[in-house]
Each structure stands twice: as C-alpha cells, then as structure tokens.
Amino acid sequence: MDIPVSVPLHTPTPTPKPASTPLPASSPLPARAQAQPRAPAQRLLRILSLVRYRFFLYAGLLPYLLGAAWAFGMLGVFDAHIFFMGLSGVVLSVVGVEAFNEYFDSRMGTDRVFDPQDAPPMSSWVLWLGVAAFAGALAVGVYLAAKDGWPILAFALLGGLAAIFYVAPPIRWAYRGLGETVIALSYGPWLVLGSLYLQTRGFSWGALCASLVPGFLIMALAVVNAIPDFQQDRLVGKRNLVVRLGRRRAVPLYLSLAAAGLLTVLIGVLAGEFPLSCLAALLALPLLVISARRAAHTYESPRQFVPAIRSIVSCYMVAVSLFTAGVVLHAWR
C-alpha cells in the first residue's frame, strides 16, 4: 500500500542513460554483474532496503492497538495471550501487503517509470515471501476463530481480500479507484473492531466511531502519497483518486480527510463517546497545518512535496498514538 516513510524521490522526466562503451579487459565488472547469490538473510535485508512504503510495516499496528486499548480502557477487558496472537497475525499481514505491493508494482512498472537506475523487476521470491506471510496470518486467524468464534475469521478474510488484491490481479483495487477506500476500511473499522472483538467477543458503537480517527487519517495518507506518483500512475493505468481528480484538487482532498480524522476526536469527546483525555490527539493539528502550507506551492514538484507527506505521516502517528493513550488512561480515571 502506497504510504511512505522513505518517500520515493522520483523526477517527472526520465534520466537519459549514458552511452555504453566496451570495458577494457582489465576493468572490473559492474557491481550487478559481480553479484553472487545472496544468503537468505542478505536477501531479506535487500528487500527491506527496497521497500518504498515501510510506514505500513508499523502503521497497521496502531489501529490494532486502538481496538485493544478500547477493550481495556472503556470495558475493562484485556487478555495478553489473545492480544499477542492477534498482533502476530497483523504483523504477518502487513509484511504480506508490502511484499505483494513491491512485487506487483514492479511487474506493472508502477513507481519505476522514471527510475534513473533502471532497476530490474522484483524477483519471484518476493512474491513467495508475501504468500508465506499471508499463509501465516491465515493460520493465526483460523486458530483464533476456532478458539473464540467465526467473526474473527470473517475479519481475517475481509482484511485478506483487501490486502492481497490491493495491487494483485485480478481485482487490483488500486487500479479501479477503490484503493483509498479499501485502505481506510482496512486500517480503520476492520482492524479496530477486529481487535476489540478478540478481547470482548462483541462490538461497540463507540469503538466504531473511534475507528474513524485512523480511518480518515490513513485515507489522507493514501491520497497524499499518490500525488508525487501522479505521472507514473497515470501511465500504467492506476486510476486512483489523484489520477482521477488531478494533483491540484487532490491537495484539498487529503487535507480534508486528515482534518476529518481530528474533527472526529473533538466531536466524539463533546458527544461523550470518547474520554476527555483523547483531546490530546489534537496536538497533531500543527503538523496538518505545516503539511498544508508546504503542499500549496509544491504539489507539482515531487521532491519539494516530500516534506508535506512526512508531516501527514507524523500527524497520523501523533494523533492515533495520543488518541489511543487517552483511551487507555480512561481505565485509571
């Protein structure tokens, strides 16, 4: 899923390749030609270095923590064994998401259209890494469902359909203009309510409202991340919201989505659904303002737009973390 911490710094025009000249007999071979087969550990480090959206390797943890925090802070329920089993499933799922996104984006040419290094497509072992991770996540889901009820498996299957087919054929949500919505649902209501159900075997309207906080913010991240990749995505047929709306109109869209996430906190506290301590999440508001000021003049320049993306990433992290902490603190009111 297309959310960066290490943001890809693509340029809007391809870099011409220098003319090739024969190497003298004494010249060393290029590094790629000299490369020897890598050990599994080296390959793992290599894929981690190539992952452009490492943010999602831990972004998925915050909604899961929010669901468990709601069970503990608002309902007084917490099972450590179930929590860590569910956490392992979430970690495996986000690893699978990253591997699938890297593999299929590479095969489709997405985000490498203007790659000056002319990087080769991802090896098939990246695909198999994703398959293994999703298989492990499914095994965890089946175990928890057998222990605590079929709704857990339903959440696992919904998340799997969203994650596996985000860029993978035949569905490719991201290529049909549904990628941002799928991200918002997966990292909002599905993860939060799934985590809550693990602990309580039930649901809560308050938790559903709380899930909108990460849901809106993560959708904003999905939109803002696609702005620098507008040209690449359009060329490979990725019909996301930025491609459909254009970069200029995408800026107020992502800002509105992020603002909606913070506004949900305020409305929830005023309505009595959220503890007063959750207002600490509004300390993320200055980061949203910083992103807005930066984006206003740089949305057509990918390199200069990077700080605007990083500010929204920070806004998400600060807001959801402080909101979750506020829910936990309610247990000691």
Image (cartoon, rainbow, N blue to C red):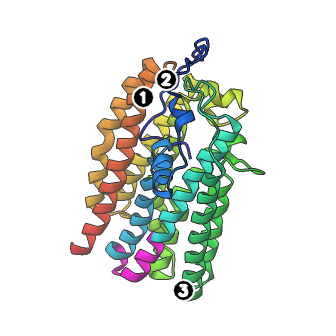
Residue designated by label 1: 306
In the picture, residue 82 is in which quadrant? bottom left
Q: Residue at x 36, y 80 (%)?
A: 80
- Name the element at disc 1: helix
Residue designated by label 3: 148
Q: Residue at x 42, y 55 (%)?
A: 58
Decide which of tag 1 and tag 3 comes sooner along the chain: 3
User: Residue 91 at what x, y percent from top left?
Assistant: 47, 63
The magenta span reads: 74-87
Q: Three-letter amino acid code at disc 1?
A: Val
Q: Three-letter amino acid code at disc 2?
A: Pro
Q: In front: 326, or 172?
A: 172
User: Residue 312 at what x, y percent from top left?
Assistant: 40, 38
Residue designated by label 2: 302
Q: Three-letter amino acid code at disc 3?
A: Asp
User: Residue 310 at what x, y percent from top left?
Assistant: 38, 36
Spatial separation of the CA atoms under disc 1 and disc 3: 44 Å
